[in-house]
């Protein structure tokens, strides 16, 4: 059997983090979660096999999602990133300017997230 | 080499870690915190750990100059741009090319200059006054402020788009009173440093009793105040005079800060959890349960103290008035540390 795909969730909102964690664990992904950008980066750097996908909030203390995505795209260019953002939290244009592969606005359906994850991972495989 | 970032508190350790992770990114940074906490030290440390460390580090104090002058400082001008411009002058953005431009007190910048800074951040280009050509600048923008930019954005005194541009990496340095464990280390460091500077003049001995008072003091002027205190003690040749001043100073500070919070209508959350406005970094300390407990404790303490005062500390009477059992009252007096003089 294949190794489960590894997903890193970064969000400072505990509720969002827990919801995503439970949902994705049920979907048989190997899920890691971090409560801010710095811890997220540390996971990325210390994990030898790397992550198959990262889901990050945009508004976070210290390292914002925009900053985090820019660092990920430089250091781990093959890792697809989904950005999630609350309505009105960020100027929309700015969220789009982030280098995320996909931006989802809260609230979104978990099924939609699942669909986006599958699309990004399969296109990543096709590109390899 | 920059002054090292001194401290073992969790927040300082975290800032050190953050610096290590972002110093090579060149992403815009905003450093916040009260006056004197060491925002420039953090900026210098970012620069020192970055690949730009051999390039210029250009500091601009945005509060120190009138608008027009600040603009010509930042962007430079061409000869003939205005009366008196008898030569070309290169701006700080040009001088900081490939290096760092440290915009201190950015919260004081005018809206019109803010939009020019935004333009540089977006395009990496700017034009000197009186010039039509655009000059490229790859300066790493590190900004600092002791103001609450979020509030300034709400009041339309700070451009929201610039705020988001700068807020890519945010480093908040808590005031010294929130990290007393750093005080002894800072004292050691600066005593050593100044004794060297002051021709190794004998520094008066710091007794344990002094240290205790220095740690307990609120340090409204933060590290800068601590530096001044050490310098004064060297000049005066003793610690007592300065430390005795603290007691009076702390009392007057306490009065002003409580008046201030009443005036600005600080939220109950700020008061009870001692938040400093940066909820994001204080978040770990927060829970509804904690807040409720603190609020209840404070109200109970006040009410019980008041009733005890009125009854001349007759606990039987007080428990009847409060409609709690005598045993509960005794427990509360002990638990809430209620003392007779607090009525």
Image (cartoon, rainbow, N blue to C red):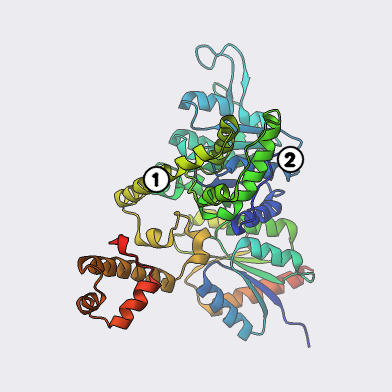
Give x and y (percent) for residue B76.
59, 24
**Marked residue chain, label 1:** B
**Marked residue chain, label 2:** B
Assess disc 1: are there few (<14), some (14-19) or many (≥20) residues with their C-alpha within 10 Å of its C-alpha.
Answer: some
Q: How many marks?
A: 2
Question: Hey, which residue is sitting farthest bottom in the picture?
Answer: A1
What residue do we see at 50% from left, 47% from top?
B163
Q: Looking at the image, is mark 2 or mark 1 earlier in the sequence?
A: 2
Residue mark closest to the camera, 2 vs 1: 1
What residue do we see at 34% from left, 71% from top?
B296
Give x and y (percent) for residue B263.
30, 48
The image quarter in which residue B195 lies = top right
The answer to whether any part of residue B175 appears in the image is no
Give x and y (percent) for residue B341.
31, 60
Left or right of B180, for residue B315: left
Left or right of B87, for residue A59: left
Q: Nearer the viewer, residue B265 or B300?
A: B300
Q: Mark 2 and mark 1, same subunit?
A: yes
Q: Secondary structure at mark 1?
A: helix
The answer to whether any part of residue B23 appears in the image is yes
**What quarter of the picture does the C terminus of chain B occupy?**
bottom left
Q: Secondary structure at mark 2?
A: loop
Q: Nearer the viewer, residue B250 or B99?
A: B250
Give x and y (percent) for residue B323.
22, 80
């Amino acid at each position: 059997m294949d190794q489960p795909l590894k997903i890193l969730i970064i969000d400072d909102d505990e509720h969002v983090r827990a919801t995503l964690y439970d949902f994705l664990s049920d979907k048989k992904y190997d899920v890691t979660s971090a409560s801010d950008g710095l811890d997220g980066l540390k996971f990325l750097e210390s994990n030898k096999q790397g992550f198959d996908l990262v889901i990050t909030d945009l508004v976070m203390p210290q390292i914002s999602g925009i900053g985090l995505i820019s660092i990920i795209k430089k250091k781990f260019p093959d890792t697809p990133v989904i950005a999630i953002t609350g309505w009105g939290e960020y100027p929309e244009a700015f969220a789009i300017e982030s280098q995320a592969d996909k931006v989802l606005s809260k609230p979104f359906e978990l099924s939609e997230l699942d669909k986006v994850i599958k699309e990004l991972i399969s296109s990543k495989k096709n590109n390899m | 080499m920059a002054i090292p970032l001194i401290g073992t508190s969790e927040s300082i350790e975290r800032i050190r870690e953050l610096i290590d992770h972002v110093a090579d990114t060149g992403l815009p940074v905003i450093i916040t915190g009260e006056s004197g906490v060491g925002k420039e030290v953090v900026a210098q440390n970012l620069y020192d750990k970055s690949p730009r460390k051999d390039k210029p580090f250009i500091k601009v104090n945005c509060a120190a100059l009138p608008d027009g002058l600040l603009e010509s400082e930042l962007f430079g001008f061409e000869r003939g741009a205005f009366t008196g411009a008898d030569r070309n002058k290169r701006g700080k953005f040009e001088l900081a090319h490939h290096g760092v431009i440290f915009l201190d007190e950015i919260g004081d910048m005018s809206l019109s200059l803010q939009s020019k800074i935004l333009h540089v951040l977006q395009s990496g280009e700017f034009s000197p006054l009186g010039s039509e050509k655009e000059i490229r600048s790859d300066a790493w923008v590190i900004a600092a402020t002791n103001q609450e930019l979020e509030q300034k954005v709400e009041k339309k005194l700070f451009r929201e788009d610039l705020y988001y541009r700068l807020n890519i990496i945010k480093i908040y340095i808590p005031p010294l009173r929130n990290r007393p464990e750093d005080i002894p280390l800072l004292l050691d460091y600066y005593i050593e440093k100044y004794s060297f500077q002051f021709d190794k003049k004998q520094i008066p001995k710091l007794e344990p009793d002094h240290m205790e008072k220095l740690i307990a003091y609120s340090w409204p002027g933060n590290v800068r105040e601590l530096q001044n205190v050490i310098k004064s003690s060297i000049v005066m040749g003793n610690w007592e005079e300065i430390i005795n001043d603290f007691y009076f100073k702390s009392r007057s500070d306490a009065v002003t800060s409580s008046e201030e919070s009443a005036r600005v209508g600080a939220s109950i959350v700020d008061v009870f959890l001692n938040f400093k406005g940066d909820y994001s970094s204080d978040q770990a300390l927060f829970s509804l349960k904690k807040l409720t407990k603190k609020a209840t404790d404070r109200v109970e303490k006040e009410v019980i103290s008041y009733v005890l005062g009125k009854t001349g500390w007759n606990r039987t009477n007080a428990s009847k008035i409060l409609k709690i059992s005598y045993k509960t009252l005794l427990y509360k007096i002990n638990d809430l540390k209620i003392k007779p003089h607090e009525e």
